[in-house]
Image: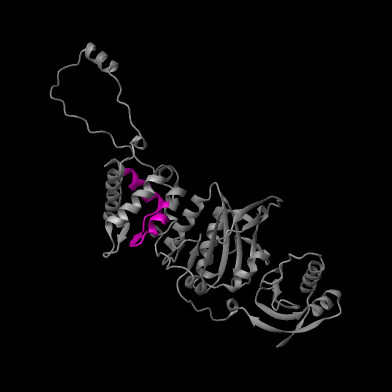
Amino acid sequence: MDVFEIPSDFRAFMQHVVAYLDVPSDNKLLDASDALRDECGYGGRIDGADTYEFTYLTADGHSKWILTLKEAAIRNIADGFLDEVMGQHHELPSVAKSRIPQGYPLLIWGEYGDDALCPRDGEQVMLALDSLHNSAGEQPRMLRMWTSCDDQLIAVVWGDLCAIYVIESPEGYATSRTDHVGSGVFEVNDHDGKPMTIPFADCVSWEIAKRGLVNFIATGELGMDIKVDGVIPTVLLVLGEVDRKIVLSQRQEPPRVLERSSLAGARMPQPQTAVPEPVQEREHTQPVTVDQVQSVREAPVKQVIDSRDTPIPQRIDEQLVWARRLITHLQTRELMEINGGSNLDEITYQLSGVLQAHWIEAEESIDTANWLCNEIGTVRGVKLFATGGDLQIALRRSREA
């Protein structure tokens, strides 16, 4: 135990705690590790009575204090009667002189197993960031990033704006800042489904943010192009306790290449070059008369039928045949694996039911297609590597076969 000299920001925190405790209410949240939050730390009641534990994060982000306080001590600190308490002092791992890599970097953008990537090279990082940007045109997206040395940040992307919150790094925590002061905010759901408010003042342009993110995953630093403040939102403080190893132990093994992840379908498609229909060789080379030209002009034009107008199989036997074609299509492209001991007929039956209910939405919406990929992947004996975009193509081609 070491002596903790009460700084002004922690005293202000305790004053807010006392004010909250004195509010008459039977529904106050106290018994959680982060029930009480402030920019300098967080804490909560640990015995259901009057004992609290607080984590105080130093202003430089290099260390923290664990303080166990009775309610009476909290009130004395708030009133200015107590200037020192005993606590446990911890140097944060990110400030160690020798930063030893512990594995590969990690990117996470969702709750599912394939909403993640362990990139083996810089090209995969660039592809992931471009895909995240492309998928965040209408709704904000959140990305969590760990370096191989457990530096950590959160980035929130919306269109060409990006807010960056550094949780662990050699320089401590930080928030990106823009030169333009703005009072507006927008909301994004974090990976636990809880809303988080992002001020526009925290956002920089995507091109600048992208360079900073690439630099961070390699060095643990954002670089000189991004201005930062040495603070982060209170709701993110607790994430500093969750390192890359803990996250990996709670999820299935992340893909190593973007093509196996859910984000691959978010990449913008390459422009397609129209392929002209083959020209039939003329049997005769004699001149064409005016009457012949007029008859061609008056000939009815062949109507192009959208592939979505192709009727869906209605009978159960037709649906099963379609499902089997889809399985074959995905297998031949190495987008699906089926356990050798699995019942293929049972898998086909389950798949046909899912297709019957959701094929229209899946072909129209990439989000529904991604969701359908997850549903197919939960079928016993099936391992699916297809993205939503892969599935949309497979649905059309197998249905029209």
Q: How is the image coloured?
A: one colour
Q: Against 49, is 364 above or below?
A: above
Q: Residue at x 46, y 61 (%)?
A: 125
Magenta-drawn stretch contains 377 = yes
Give the image quarter of residue 288.
top left
Q: Is residue 82 left or right of residue 183?
A: right
Instruction: Name the outermost residue toward the front.
Output: 316
Q: Which residues are magenta?
A: 372-397
Q: Residue at x 35, y 53 (%)?
A: 350
Magenta segment's dominant SS is helix
**Would you say residue 129 is visible in this rendering?**
yes
* Image location of residue 282, percent across then percent down: 16, 25
Q: Position of residue 115 (x, y in %)?
A: 47, 60
Residue 359 location, quadrant: top left
Task: Tell me: residue 305, above or below residue 123.
Answer: above
Say whether residue 165 is magenta.
no
Quadrant for the C terminus in the image: top left
Q: Position of residue 323 (x, y in %)?
A: 30, 49
| Residue displayed at 29% across by 37% down | 275
Quick check: 45 above or below 398? below
User: Would you say 10 lies left or right of 191 here?
Assistant: right
* Residue closest to the eye, 160 or 108: 108
Question: Looking at the image, which residue sits at the far bottom?
Answer: 1
| Residue at the spot 71% in from the left edge and 70% down from the top edge | 30
Q: Residue 206 location, x and y as percent?
A: 56, 53
